[in-house]
């Protein structure tokens, strides 16, 4: 039975990493498209003013708590979220499972050429996985029919979309009724990480939930976006 908690009107599934993966395995055996999103505090704050984004998340089949701020909010509110379930870790578990079961994937996102490199690296690392296709994320509206046709011809089991939030969530929602795949998941910078054009924070930062701080050190221009984290926590405290 699905259990969710609500953080500033945004529903989050109360699942562990293991439980999330078990649910995703079930999704991959079902005929209809399942939508998976991984909001962090920044996305939750965007959803406060973006009613379309809020509706999209509310209609998701699985919403994962990607961000230590959501765990902190859960503790403040006494909501009891089990643990942080990041998009990139979930993507890796799906790649491992796909390699074991011979599932196919499609990557959409990154600069021209990046998705292709990511696919080659994934194919080399996860033996047995099937690459259905790829397309870069710097497309225009006129290219979208070609992208949809390309995806639907290849009929991937999993469509990983790395367009950044909220573009990737809105893109999935826009085409949810015509995409021919089992699972569509927004993965932010996932394509860049597998291509090697971006790196995850060192393990110590991951374990402490400080990946956001590591990114800020590496990319100081993110400071404006990162200010959403203290704003988020202040809003949580004020609405307690």
Image (spheres, rainbow, N blue to C red):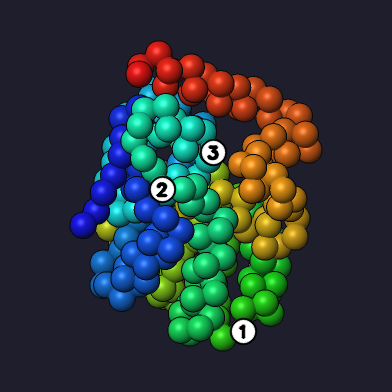
Can residue 18 be seen at all in this image of the molecule?
yes
Mark 3 or 1, closer to the camera:
3
- The residue drawn where x is 71% and y is 52% is 203
Q: Residues within 10 Å of mark 2 (few under 14, many from 20)?
A: some
Q: Quadrant of the N terminus?
A: bottom left
Mark positioned earlier in the residue sequence (3 or 1): 3
- The residue drawn where x is 49% and y is 68% is 94
Q: Position of residue 153 (x, y in %)?
A: 42, 75
Q: How far apart are the alpha carbons under marks 3 and 1? A: 32 Å
Which image quadrant is residue 116 in?
Answer: bottom right
Q: In the structure shown, which secondary structural element does the residue marked by tag 1 occupy?
A: loop
> What mark, if any, has residue 68 been given in the picture?
3
Q: Position of residue 137 (x, y in %)?
A: 58, 52
Q: In the structure shown, which secondary structural element does the residue marked by tag 3 occupy?
A: helix
Q: Residues within 10 Å of mark 1 (few under 14, many from 20)?
A: some
Q: How far apart are the alpha carbons under marks 2 and 3? A: 12 Å
Residue 203 left/right relative to 35: right
Residues 35 and 207: in front is 207
State the residue position of label 2. Answer: 82
- The residue drawn where x is 26% and y is 67% is 32
Does residue 92 lie above or below 104 as drawn? above
- The residue drawn where x is 78% and y is 38% is 218
Can residue 130 be seen at all in this image of the molecule?
no
Does residue 59 lie above or below 45 as drawn? below
Residues 143 and 11: in front is 11
Mark positioned earlier in the residue sequence (2 or 3): 3
State the residue position of label 1. Answer: 127
């Amino acid at each position: 039975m699905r259990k969710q908690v609500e953080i500033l009107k945004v529903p989050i599934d109360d699942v562990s990493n293991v439980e999330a993966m078990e649910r995703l395995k079930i999704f991959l055996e079902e005929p209809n498209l399942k939508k998976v999103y991984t909001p962090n505090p920044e996305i939750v704050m965007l959803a406060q003013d973006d009613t379309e984004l809020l509706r999209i998340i509310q209609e998701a089949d699985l919403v994962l708590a990607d961000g230590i701020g959501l765990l902190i909010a859960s503790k403040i509110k006494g909501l009891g979220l089990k643990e942080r379930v990041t998009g990139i870790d979930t993507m890796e578990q799906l790649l491992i499972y796909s390699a074991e079961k011979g599932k196919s994937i499609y990557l959409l996102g990154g600069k021209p050429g990046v998705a292709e490199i990511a696919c080659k690296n994934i194919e080399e690392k996860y033996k047995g996985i099937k690459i259905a296709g790829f397309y870069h994320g710097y497309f225009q509206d006129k290219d979208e029919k070609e992208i949809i046709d390309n995806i639907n011809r290849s009929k991937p089991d999993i469509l990983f979309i790395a367009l950044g939030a909220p573009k990737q969530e809105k893109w999935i929602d826009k085409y949810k009724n015509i995409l021919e795949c089992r699972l569509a998941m927004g993965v932010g910078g996932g394509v860049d990480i597998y291509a090697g054009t971006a790196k995850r924070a060192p393990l110590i930062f991951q374990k402490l939930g400080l990946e956001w701080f590591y990114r800020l050190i590496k990319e100081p221009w993110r400071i404006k976006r990162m200010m959403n984290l203290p704003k988020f926590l202040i809003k949580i405290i004020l609405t307690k």
